[in-house]
Amino acid sequence: MKSILITLASLLLPHLSGVTAATATPAKPNVVLIFIDDMGYGDIGPFGSVKNRTPNLDRMAKEGMKLTSFYAAPVCSVSRAQVMTGCYGQRVSIPGVFSPGSQHGINASEHTVAELMKAQGYATKAIGKWHLGDQPEFLPTRHGFDEYFGLPYSNDMMKKARVNGQLVVPLVRGEKVIELLTGDDQDRLTERYTDEAVKFITENRDRPFFLYVPHTAVHVPIHPGEKFRDRSKNGRYGDWVEEVDWSVGRVLDTLRELKLAENTLVMFSSDNGPWLVKGRDGGTAGPLRGGKGTTWEGGVREPTLAWWPGKIAPGGVCDAVAGNIDFLPTFVKLAGGTVPADKKIDGKDITPLLLGQTKESPHEARYYYSGYKLQAVRVGPWKLAIAPQNDGLGKEETPVPASPDKPRLYNLDMEIGEQTDIAAEHPDVVARLKPLAVKMAAELGDGKPGPEVRAAGFVENAVTLYPVDEGPKKAAAKKNANTPGASLENLRLGDILSGAQAPQVAHRPITITCEAETTSRDGVLVAHGGVAIGYTLYLKEGHVVFAVHNANRDIVRITSPEAISGKVTIQARLAADGAMTLVLDGKTVASGKADGTLTREPMESFCVGHDDAKTVDTYDGKTLFKGSIRNIRISTTESQPRQ
Ligand SMILES: [Ca+2]
C-alpha cells in the first residue's frame, strides 16, 4: 500500500509542480502598440468610414474591442509624451510640438513605458515617428528602447541637406542617421516599418516583447506605397489608410502564424485628430466637431482598438473614458511590474475595461489642454468648456468663446457633435464639473505652467541631426535684414537687427530704455520676436504696453494706467525671475509677472519703431512709429542700467 502511494505521488508530483509553476509565473504577455499620425475618428471601417477600405482593422475590431471614448492630445509631441510617460504632456513640460534641433525632450528622470517594460525583461523596439526630441539624449534608445528605426519627427519637417541640396528627412537606426529620405523615398516607409515590425516579432517570439509602431502615415505629405497608389475611393489619403490597414494585417497575421496571438495584446490608436485644412490630404473626424489642434472631440478622440484573442471578448465596445495616458500603467501591470510611486502620473490601469470586468472609467474626469491652457473637462457624458476653443490647426476662424464664468456645456451621449450649449439648463452639472477644472488648472496650469509641472529634458547646444543648408534665399534674406550701419549702441527709428546683431536675450533679464515723443496714439517702439517667442514695447490708444511672450505660454502684458502725452522716458524691464515693470519718467506705473526669462532667442528680427514679418503682439507692425524714439538702449545684464 505504501509503495503504491509513493508511486502515485511520484506520478502526480511532477504534474502538480508543473501546474503550480505555471500558476505562479504565467507567461508575460507581449504588447504591441500601433500608433497612427493624424488619423481621424471617422477614418476606418470600425468607426464608420465607408470610403477607406480597412478589412484588417474591421477584423481586428470584430475579434477584439472598440474603444469609443479614447483620448489623445491635440498635437503630435504632446500625445507621444503621454504615451511614454503616462502623464498629461503638460505635467512633463511637453505642451507643444518639437521642431528639428529642439533643445527639449523627455527628462531622463521620468519613467517611460519602455523603461518599465524593459525592467520586466521585455525586448523593446520603437519603429516609426518618435517626435519627442531629436538630440541624442532624447532619442528612443535613451528612453528604454533597445532598438529604434524611423523618422525622429514629422515627415513634413524637411530641411535642405547640405550634402545633396535636397529637401529631406533623416531615417535613423539606433542613434545614427542611415539615410536622408526625399519625398519620393517616403513612399516605402510604411512597408519598411512593417518589415521591421515583423522581423522584430519573429526574432523575439520566445521572449516577452514590447513593440511600439508609431507610423509616419497618415501625416502630410501623403506617401502611400506604390502597391496602394490610386486604389482607394478616397484619393491618396485613402490609399495610405489602406496601406496602414495592410500593415496592421501583417502584424496580426505574424502573431497568428507564430502562435503568439493569445499571448499578445495589440492596441491601435492615433495621436490626434485629422488635419482638416489639408482638404483631401486630411482625414475625417466623422461625427465629431473640429480636428487636429483643437480640444473639440475631433481633435483628441481617437479611433482605438484592442485585440487579444482569448482574453478580450470579441466584438466588444467600450464607451468609458480612457486615453493614451493609460497605456503605461496598463502595459506595466500586464507585464507584472508596478509603476514607481516617486512621480505622480495621470494614467490608470484599464485592464478591467479591456477584459470586460467593468464598464466604469477609472478616471474621475478627462481634461482637455491646449498648450498650458485648460479648455475643457469631461465627466461621463458631460463636457464643460471653460476657455475659447479653435476650430482647427491652421484655420482662421474666431474661437468659440467660453470662460469659467460663462462656460459651455455639452452632453456627448445626446449630441456627440458639440453644437448645443445646454449650460443654462443644467446648472447642477456645471457646478459639479467646474471645481474639477479649477483644481486641475491650479495643478498643471491655466495659461502658464502650474506648480505640479515637472521640467522637460534640456540640452544647451542642440543641433540638427544632419548638416542642413538654409539655402541662399533665406540666408540672404537674413543678412539683408540688418539695417546697414545699425548697431545696438546707436539705435534709430526703423532699424532692424537680426541673428547675432540682435540683442541676445535667451535666459537673460531684459531692460529697454528710450525717450519717445509722439502725437500718435498707437505704434511700436521696440519689438523683437514673432508669434512663438519675443517681447515688445508699444503704444495702444495712448497707453504704453510692455508684453513678453515665452514659448508655449500665454503672452503677458503690463500697461500704463494713464495715456501718455508729449515727451516721455520709458523703461521696461523683465527681471531674471520674470518680474515685469514699466517705469515712465522715473515712476513705476505698472508691474506684472512673466514665467521667467525667454527660453530661447527669438527667430525674428529686433526692430525699432515697427515689428516686421510676424508680430509679437496683435497690432499694426508695418507702419513706422510716427514721432521720435531716442536714446534707445537694451541691456541684458543682471543689474539695472543707470539712466
Ligand atoms: Ca499628429
Image (cartoon, rainbow, N blue to C red):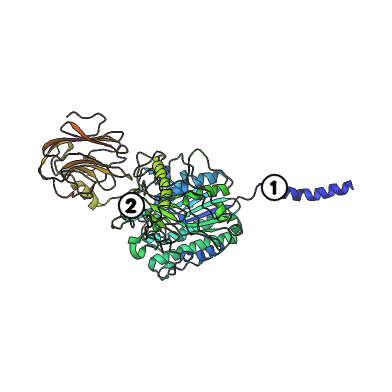
Residue 205 appears left or right of 541: right
Q: CA distance from mark 2 to mark 1?
A: 59 Å
Task: From the image, tell me which residue sits under label 1.
Answer: 21
Please provide percent x and percent y for residue 408.
Answer: 36, 54
Displayed-image quarter of ligand 1:
bottom left
The kind of residue tagged 1 is: Ala
Viewer-side label of 2, 1 = 2
Residue 177 appears left or right of 547: right
Residue 16 appears left or right of 506: right
The kind of residue tagged 2 is: Ala
Q: Earlier in the sequence, mark 2 or mark 1?
A: 1
Please provide percent x and percent y for residue 447.
Answer: 34, 45
Which type of secondary structure does the marked residue at label 1 adopt?
Answer: helix
Which type of secondary structure does the marked residue at label 2 adopt?
Answer: loop
Please provide percent x and percent y for residue 16.
Answer: 75, 49
Residue at 46% x, 41% y is: 110
